[in-house]
Image (cartoon, helix red, strand yellow):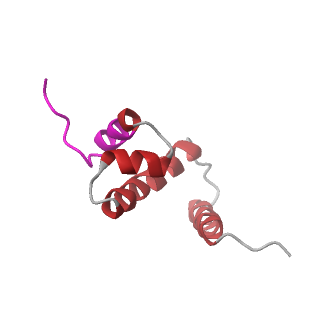
Amino acid sequence: MKKKNVLEECVRASLEQYLADLGDADPTDLHEMVIRFVEKPVLEVVMERVQGNQSRAADMLGMTRNTLRKKLIAHKLLAERSV
């Protein structure tokens, strides 16, 4: 018997509830919405865990530091520096 992934089950249950709450209405851009709402808390938790160290966070997330910075700015978790 395959062990259930708790995170996967949580996302599944949340999506099922979201769709049930919509009733007969069809959502649009569901994938983009899910990514946006999942990505921000992932970034917050990782940045907290590494005490703000972007290099460590990027390694942990499997992305470049530049990509991480862009995502942090997009989610308003890091102020964009004026050049």
Residue that sits furthest to the left in the current view: 82
Query: Magenta includes 55?
Result: no
User: In the rendered structure, which segment of residues is drawn in magenta?
Assistant: 68-83
- Position above or below: 22 against 34: below
Question: Residue 74: x percent and y percent?
Answer: 32, 39
| Residue depicted at 20% across the width and 35% down the height | 80
Residue that sits furthest to the top in the current view: 83
- Position above or below: 13 against 83: below
| Residue depicted at 29% across the width and 51% down the height | 53
Q: Is residue 7 left or right of residue 72?
A: right
Q: Nearer the viewer, residue 32 or 3?
A: 3
| Residue depicted at 27% across the width and 49% down the height | 77
Question: Residue 78: x percent and y percent?
Answer: 23, 45
Instruction: Give the number of marks.
Output: 0
Q: Which quadrant would the C terminus be assigned to in this image?
A: top left
Q: Nearer the viewer, residue 80 or 55?
A: 55
User: Based on the displayed image, in which of its 4 quarters is residue 17 positioned?
Assistant: bottom right
User: Based on the displayed image, in which of its 4 quarters is residue 37 positioned?
Assistant: bottom left
Q: Is residue 82 left or right of residue 56?
A: left
Q: Nearer the viewer, residue 58 or 83?
A: 58
Q: Is residue 68 left or right of residue 25?
A: left
| Residue depicted at 76% across the width and 74% down the height | 3
Question: Residue 23: x percent and y percent?
Answer: 62, 61
Q: Which quadrant would the N terminus be assigned to in this image?
A: bottom right
